[in-house]
Amino acid sequence: MRELPVELYRAAQVRELDRIAIEDRGIPGITLMNRAGEAAFNWLRERWPHARRIVVVCGGGNNGGDGYVVAQLARKAGLDVLALTLTDPGNLRGDAQTAWQDAQAADVPTTVFTATSLKDADLLVDAILGTGLEREVSGAWRDTIEAMNACPADILAIDIPSGLHADTGAILGVAIQAAATITFIGMKQGLLTGQGPACCGALHFADLEVPPDIYRAIHPACWRYAGDDLAGLLPKRRRSAHKGHFGHVLVVGGEQGLAGAARMAGEAAARCGAGLVRVATRAAHAGLQAAVRPELMFRGVETLDELDALLDWATVIAIGPGLGRGDWGRAMLRAVLASDKPLVLDADGLNLLAIESAFRENWILTPHPGEAARLLKMTPAEVEADRFAAVEDLALRFGGVAVLKGAGSLIASKTDGAVALCAAGNPGMASGGMGDVLTGVIAALVAQGLSPFAAAKAGVYLHGQAGDLAARNGGERGLLATDLLPFLRQLVNP
């Protein structure tokens, strides 16, 4: 067992790693299966030390074989264990058949699955469906998963919660809602985005002692960004530094009645180290906002002439928070798009872009699934069905860098040809203004010299980490976007 790796793979890639370990390195498949079962059982005992009655639900493939190993080990440890089968074990093949025979030799009680067999279990083990699932779960398989989810006992999922797509993080009809998941050899990218985090619960990884150099043969499909390079991206400032060294952020937004969004973006930019921040907003808002946050420079802008001078001043422009979709917002966006400055586009900036499409290399788009759906002319459900495909399509169609927000936010760069995943953040961040704060964070990092891809990755990570720290400080429910600001300041000083 080790820390979650940063390399993320598709299911087919993990199967290839498994093949290399078995065929090229001579590790018997049953050895890997026994190691998987042992790692799962050890984690079971560590997480649920008082569980005595263990019910293991086994499917008909190698995932079921892992389950039989767990059942065998539980039996040998003196626990009250029951293995429930969904297919005739006599039809198992290869290593899974060997694992079942070993369980029988250990006198593991085995019977055909019924919902009543789950009664009085302290813990359920999901060893039903593995990473090869490609179609919607139906029939008896669906009934089994629903019965397990309805049981009050916790569920430990083996390798992947049954019903979850390993590549996309989408639920294929129905999926196990596990309290914990242990996965093997390669971290599947779908476990960390979309519905993956909700289905997996606490996520753990075991490499099964395969030779480390086998990973050189497979290039990861994605990388989990965990902020390991922040100290280099945001080094300690020189004693001779002044505000001109750290860039000028211009936030454009704040239509009538929407002043707070632009202000939050501006304040986040300032808290993350931008040298100077100006907010171009409707004139009616400027004076009041300046009184509340005097460190920001609010400028009432009603005409394009008033905006032009600010565009020349800016190092980077963030547009969209509170922009609105009326004539004023449209005019502001057209003027900003006519400039050659790096941009961060969010909120109504994205909604307007969906109406009048554009392409450029030096911008960062930060849509949530609804905004991404409008940009891609599809439904939010279609976006969520394959978040990786959606974020890569956004970067290809519009250029630059695309951030698809949500559980397991994804960052794709057309220039770098790479996708990163950030697992930081929590459900408390599902509240108004969080996206405005993220816009300001990313803009501040661009202003300080980070490339668009680096700024997007680091910005999403800092934003999520700040949300996690704020939630620990007072809980998830009721978390406000501005609660992140003091933690952002801490995090940008690594």
Image (cartoon, rainbow, N blue to C red):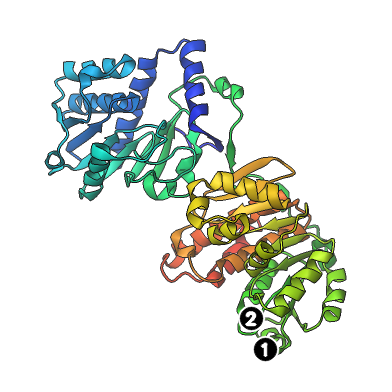
Q: Which amino acid is tagged 1?
A: Leu
The residue under the point 61% across, 58% down is 491
* Label total for image: 2
Q: In the image, 13: left or right of 376?
A: left
Task: Judge depth for marks 1 and 2 and give the one in front.
Answer: 2
Dot 1 and dot 2 residues touching (CB under 8 Å): yes
Q: Position of residue 264 (x, y in %)?
A: 63, 73
Of 376 and 412, nearer the camera is 376
Of 198 and 462, nearer the camera is 198
Q: Is residue 273 above or below residue 40?
A: below
Name which quarter of the figure residue 239 lies in: bottom right
Q: Which residue is mark 2?
A: 259
Q: Residues within 10 Å of mark 1 (few under 14, many from 20)?
A: few
The residue under the point 49% across, 35% down is 187
Q: CA distance from mark 1 to mark 2?
A: 10 Å
As drawn, the label of residue 288 is: 1
Q: Position of residue 278 (x, y in %)?
A: 76, 75
Q: In the image, 341: left or right of 460?
A: right
